[in-house]
Image (cartoon, rainbow, N blue to C red):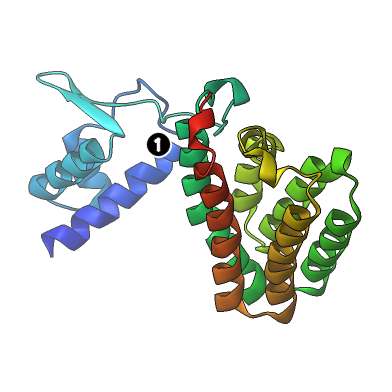
Amino acid sequence: MTTTLAQRVVAGLKSRILDGTLAPGEKLPSEADLIDEYAVSRTVVREAVTRLRAEGLVETFQGRGSFVLAVPEPTTFRVEASAIRTQHDVLAMLDFRLGIESEAAYLAAAHRTPEGAEQVRAALEAFSAAEPGEAVEADFAFHRAVAAATGNRFYLDLLDSLGPMMIMLPRTRLPDEFSHTDAAHVERVRREHDNVGAAVLAGDADTARAAMRVHLGNTRRRLLSGGSRSA
């Protein structure tokens, strides 16, 4: 019972902190005021304040009371190309993308909409028709279309923060046999994208996830084959 009552006090105070009614640096109402306001015991009020302290919303000073802490400002996730200096960094970025984009492909297929499917189809066609000088932008546009098709803005925000450099940096470290002037390599990569796109368009979520893992896993293996070319 005490815990349930404390939750009610926590919810009320947290709402006032988050909407700015209780501003950063402002002192919480006294124990007596909270007891009257919520019709609870001193024990309940102290438990509620302890919980708010544990969540990083208030700070308590002996003899002075509890004060509202500033809620951390949201930060924008960004990866600067200049911060990815070595082949190890590029491999780490690919490992990161494997986890993120495989799930994005799954969700794009599972939550397929006519609008999302059309964007993926158009991006796939543009990638297939791209000239070598347009390949990086077209490749990124396809991955971005898959992220957009999830319907989850965080996937899209993340890919936008990475930008085309997520495609360009691995390519700069690939061995010569994986050049985009090599017809066999270009065809392999095109098929990998086709497999991802086809699964998304078919609404086959498990296959879409697997196809994206194969594509990015193959990119990783191609990069490892040129390990001696670390930058």
- Lateral position of residue 153 relative to residue 17, left or right: right
Q: Position of residue 228 (x, y in %)?
A: 49, 31
- Lateral position of residue 212 relative to residue 98, left or right: right
The N terminus: image quadrant: bottom left
> Which quarter of the picture shows residue 54?
top left
Q: Which residue is mark 1?
A: 17
> Which quarter of the picture shows residue 16?
top left
Residue depicted at x 10% and y 19%: 63
What amino acid is at disc 1? Ile
| Pick the front one: 20 or 92 | 92
Q: Is residue 82 above or below residue 31?
A: above
| Pick the front one: 226 or 4 | 226
Q: How many marks?
A: 1
Residue depicted at x 48% and y 46%: 96
Q: Secondary structure at mark 1?
A: helix
| Pick the front one: 190 or 145 | 190
| Pick the front one: 222 or 157 | 222
- Lateral position of residue 119 relative to residue 97, left or right: right
Q: Position of residue 28 (x, y in %)?
A: 28, 30
Q: Position of residue 195 (x, y in %)?
A: 69, 71
Q: Is residue 112 visible?
A: no
Q: Is residue 70 visible?
A: yes
Q: Which residue is farthest front?
A: 177
Q: Is residue 211 above or below residue 98?
A: below
Q: Residues within 10 Å of mark 1 (few under 14, many from 20)?
A: many
Residue depicted at x 41% and y 45%: 15
Residue depicted at x 47% and y 47%: 95
